[in-house]
Image (tube, rainbow, N blue to C red):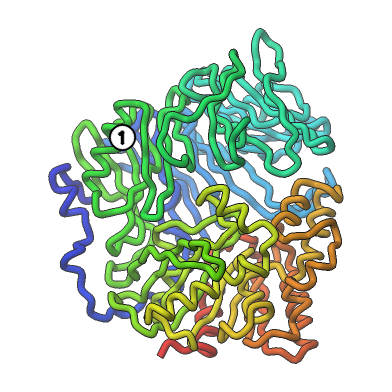
Amino acid sequence: MKRLTAALLATSVLWGVGGRALAQTAPADLSVYGAMPAYDIPSLSPSGDRLAYIAVVGEDRSLIINDLADMSLIGGVRAGDVKVRDLDWIGETHVMITTSATQASNLTGMQRSELYEGQIYSLATRRVAKALGPVEGVFPRLAGSPIIRNINGGLLIAPASGFKGLGLYEINLATGGSLRVVQEQQRAGGYVFDAEANPVSRVVYDGRTYEWELQAHANGFWRTVWSVRAPIDTPGVAGLGATTRELVIYGGEGARPDEYRIFNLDTRQWSNLPFEGKVDSPIFHPKTKLLIGAATETEIGRDYQFLDADAQRVWRSVAAAFRTKRTRFVSWSEDMRQIIVLTEGDGDPGTYQLIDMDRRLAEVIGALYPLTPEQVGDIRVVEYPAADGMTIPGYLTLPPGVTDPKNLPLVVLPHGGPASRDTLGFDWWAQAIASRGYAVLQPNFRGSDGLGQAHLEAGYGQWGRKMQTDLSDGVRWLAGQGWIDPAKVCIVGASYGGYAAMAGPTIDPGVYRCAVSVAGVSDLRAMVQWSSGQSGARDAPAVRYWNRFMGAERLGDRDLDAISPAKQAARSDAPILLLHGRDDTVVPFIQSKMLADALRAAGKPYEFIELSGEDHWLSRAETRTRMLNETVRFLETHNPPR
C-alpha cells in the first residue's frame, strides 16, 4: 500500500485531471459493475489501531482485520454467501457483523420479510457467536439498530422482539445470548443511550391512534415530555444534542418532516440546529455520542460543518488534500486522529483512503471497482424546466471519453422511492450503461426527497402524472441542447423507477423506444391492498403513504387504474423488459407478472425474466450482473448506440 505525505496528497493522489487521456478504451465487462464492491464497510477500532472490513470475491464475503501499525493480518473469518449490511467494533477485541436474509417465521406467524441477525467475532478466540442466542420468549433476530458502547471492554445492547413486544438485551460477547434484560418487553422503541450506556429517551408509537410520544428517563422512571399525532410522517430521534439533556429530532414541533430540530428534555423547548442550510444528516462524536457536526448533500457533493473545533480542522485538512475530489467521511477513531474517507471524481470510481492526522500520512486501503480513469464516464450537473415551469435538477453521465456530447443515444434512469434522490457520485448502474455508449439521465423529479419540502410535496398525487412527465421533459430539454438524439431514447429503473419505466410506454407514450423495469409496481390498486394486508390495517401508515403519492382517496380507489401500467397495457408503444427477484419483500413478484400477462393479452412486445433468489435491492452479484447483461442486451437490440 502506497503511503503519501500530506504535501503530496493534493497532487499525487489525484487521477490527473489535466492529463486525462480521451482516447477510446475498451469498456470493462459488465460483471465488473455487477459485482459487489470488492472492499466494503471499512471500520476503525475505537483506538484507531485496528481496521476491519469485508472482502468480497464473487458471492463470498470475509471479515478481515488488520493491525494498522504494519497492516499485518491479525484476524478474520469467512462469512460465505451472505448479505452483510453493517460492521461495528465492540471495544478493541470484538467485531459485530450484521447480516440479513429473506425469511418467514412459522413460529411467530411473521410473513416473508428481510430479517437481520448479528454475529460477534472475537479476536482472542477467532470464533463467531450469534448475538441473539436462545432466549425464552425472544425472537432471535435484531429488531433495530444495536447500541454499542466502548466501555468495560465493549458493551452490546441488542433490540429484539418477543411475544410481549420489544425488549433490550445486553449481549454476552464471548458466547452470544443475553446477559441481562436492559429494558423489559413493551411497545416502546427508538431508544437513545448516553456514552456510558445510561438510557436518556425512548419513543412510544400507537399504530391505532397514531399518537407518537417522546419519553425521558429520570430516577428510574419514564415520563412523556412531548407528543404529537402522526398518521404518516412520524418524527424520529437521531441522537443526543450538544449535551445529554438535548435531543436531535427530525419532524419535531414547527419543523418539516425532513427537518432536524433540537429538543431540551428539561425545559421542553425547541431550537434550531446551529448549522447553515438544510441538514441531511447530523454527525455525532465517536466517543461522547454528542452532536458535533452535520452533513449536507449539495448538487456538487457532500459538505460538512462542525461545532467541534478539532473536527473542523480535520475536515479542512482533508478537504484541502482532496480538493478536486468529492470526499465523504466513513469512519474515525474516538480521538478523531485516524480517519477513513471515500473519495470519488476525476475518473476515480470510489477509493477508500486511510488518513493519519498525527503523522500527516495517507494511504489507499481499498477500491470499490477495478476500473481505470479512462473507463469512467464524466458526470454533469444539469437543471431543466418541467412543462409547468418547475425546476428539475439531475445528473447526466456521459460515455467514457466523451467531453462534447452531440446526438447521443439516451437512457433515462429514474431513482426509486419515490421519496429518495440521486446524488453526485459514481453510480454502478449508470456507469455500466454509459460504458456501452449511452448518455444516462438521472433526474430528481418532483417528489424526490432531500431537495426541500416544497419539491417533495409537489410529487403528492403525481404518480403517472407530473412525476412521469418530469422525466420526458428532461428528454426534450437535452434534445434542445443538441446533446441527445430524441429518436434514440429508452427508460430504465428499479422499484419506483421500475414503475416509471413501465409507465413510459403505457402512460406517457411517444417518447421511448424501449423500457426496462426491475421490481416495478404495475397495478397501483393491488399494491396498496397488498400493503394493507401486510400491515393488517386498512388505514395503516404505509397505506396512507402510498395513497398520498399515488393520489388515491381511499383503499381500492379505482382512479388508480388510469395510472397503472398493467391496466393501460394496451396503450404500450414500445417493447418492455421486466425483471423481478423472487425474494422481493417490498414490491411483490406478482406486480411484474401482472404487467407481463396484460402485455401478452394485448399482443404487445415484452420479455419477463425471474431473478431467482434475489431481493428488492439487488444484493447478489450473480443476479445483479445478469440484470445488467439483460438490460444492455435489450437496449442494444431496440436502441443500438450506433
The residue lying furthest to the top in this view is: 219
The residue lying furthest to the front in this view is: 389
**Label 1 element class:** strand
Residue 567 vs residue 129, the one in the foreground: 567
Left or right of 560, for residue 359: left
Percent of width and height locating residue 191: 63, 27
Q: Quadrant of the C terminus?
A: bottom left
Residue 78 vs residue 534, the one in the foreground: 534
Residue 160 vs residue 134, the one in the foreground: 160
Which image quarter: residue 25? bottom left
Left or right of 395, for residue 625: right
Percent of width and height locating residue 223: 71, 16
Q: Which residue is mark 1?
A: 338
What amino acid does circle 1 point to? Gln
Left or right of 365, for residue 522: right
Percent of width and height locating residue 295: 42, 41
Residue 70 vs residue 605, the one in the foreground: 605
Which image quarter: residue 356? top left
Q: How many marks?
A: 1
